[in-house]
Amino acid sequence: MATNWTIGADAADPQRLAEFWAAALDYVQEPGYEDPEGASIVDPDDVGPAIGFLRVPEPKTSKNRFHIDIRVAGPTRDDVTAERMRTKASELVGLGATQVREEFYGPDVLGHIVMLDPEGNEFCVG
């Protein structure tokens, strides 16, 4: 049996990042978690890991070495999956993310979309 685990993230505004990532991943606020210096979100189906956000005083200063990728494309890369990636990226922009660039696998095959969350943390939609 696998070990349960949680992703931990530093944040300037834990509640705002928790709201963004809950919407991005279809997660919910963790019931009973009430900490003004932190926030926690969980998979409502109890399959994925929890994600905790803790307020820290220092700002983000460099590229993250670990990040979350949102997978909407499936195993094949075609026009339909490219449209799913672009649709999800657009939804996330509406939630406060920034689209950085599209990365292609070959001349016309969209591989993934590089984005930033509301605090500038890199992630991809693929």
Image: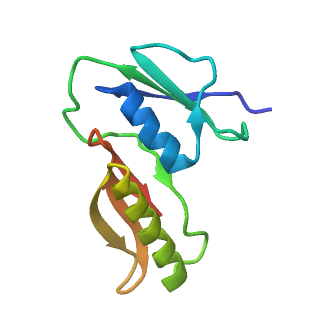
Q: Residue furthest right?
A: 1
Where's residue 37, x and y in %? 39, 14
Above or below for 61 versus 54: below
Instruction: Report how many numbered discs are placed on residues in the image.
Output: 0
In front: 18, or 59?
Answer: 18
The residue at 45%/69% (across/down) is: 87
Where's residue 9, x and y in %? 41, 29
Where's residue 69, x and y in %? 47, 52
In front: 120, or 30?
Answer: 30
The residue at 38%/86% (across/down) is: 108
**Corner quadrant of residue 50:** top right
Q: Please state, as top left, top right, bottom left or bottom right, where the N terminus lies in the image.
A: top right
Identify the coloring: rainbow
The residue at 45%/33% (across/down) is: 18
Above or below for 118 versus 41: below
Where's residue 28, x and y in %? 59, 36
The residue at 32%/51% (across/down) is: 97
**Corner quadrant of residue 58:** top left
Above or below for 35 versus 76: above
Position of 120 compared to 38: left or right? left
